[in-house]
Amino acid sequence: MRVWLQHHGLSLAQTLARLARSPFATTLNVLAIGVALALPFGVYCVLGNLESLSRNASVDPQLSVFLARDAAKADIAAVEARLKGAMGVSAVRFVSRDAALVELNRAAGMGEVIASLPQNPLPDAFVVTLS
């Protein structure tokens, strides 16, 4: 066992001496090994981010139609009827101001900021899904 340890110690000393004789080549070799090991990890991270981005992307094209803050119920009904009758529209969904505020709070997680607002700044809206 002692001979084995002496042999490995001698090999380590010779290796370190060779590395010390050519520090530039040693540095380049270490950098090449580092890049070769880091490259698959970088690709894995990029693919993971692209996957989460594509998961949040909407497949169906949507259009938001914002209404005036003082729009009457009759005006809202007229706009909805007009949107439903438009060509190329597959669905129309009304989103009230309060529902939009709840959705914003859920999606963005800005509960403290939203709670500090004196009034709801969001308008009523229609989400129009195009065909």
Image: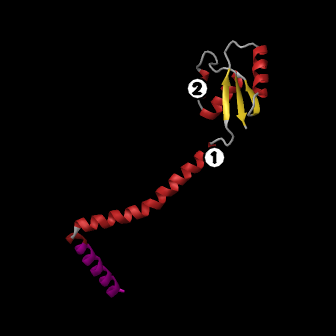
Q: Nearer the viewer, residue 126 or 105?
A: 126
Q: Nearer the viewer, residue 61 or 16?
A: 61
Residue 91, how many percent across, how many down? 76, 33
Report crowding for label 2: few under 14, some 14 to 19, many 20 or more residues within 10 A (C-alpha). few
The tag earlier along the polypeptide, 2 or 1, is 1
Residue 63, how many percent across, how many down? 67, 31
Which coloring applies here? secondary structure
Q: Residue at x 28, y 64 (%)?
A: 27
Residue 88, how many percent across, how many down? 73, 34
Q: Which residues are magenta?
A: 1-18
Say which residue label 1 marks: 55
Write down the quadrant of residue 59 in the picture. top right
What kind of element bears circle 1?
helix
Residue 68's disc number: none
Say which residue label 2 marks: 112
What kind of secondary structure does the magenta stretch mostly adopt?
A: helix
What kind of element bears circle 2?
helix
Magenta stretch contains residue 6: yes
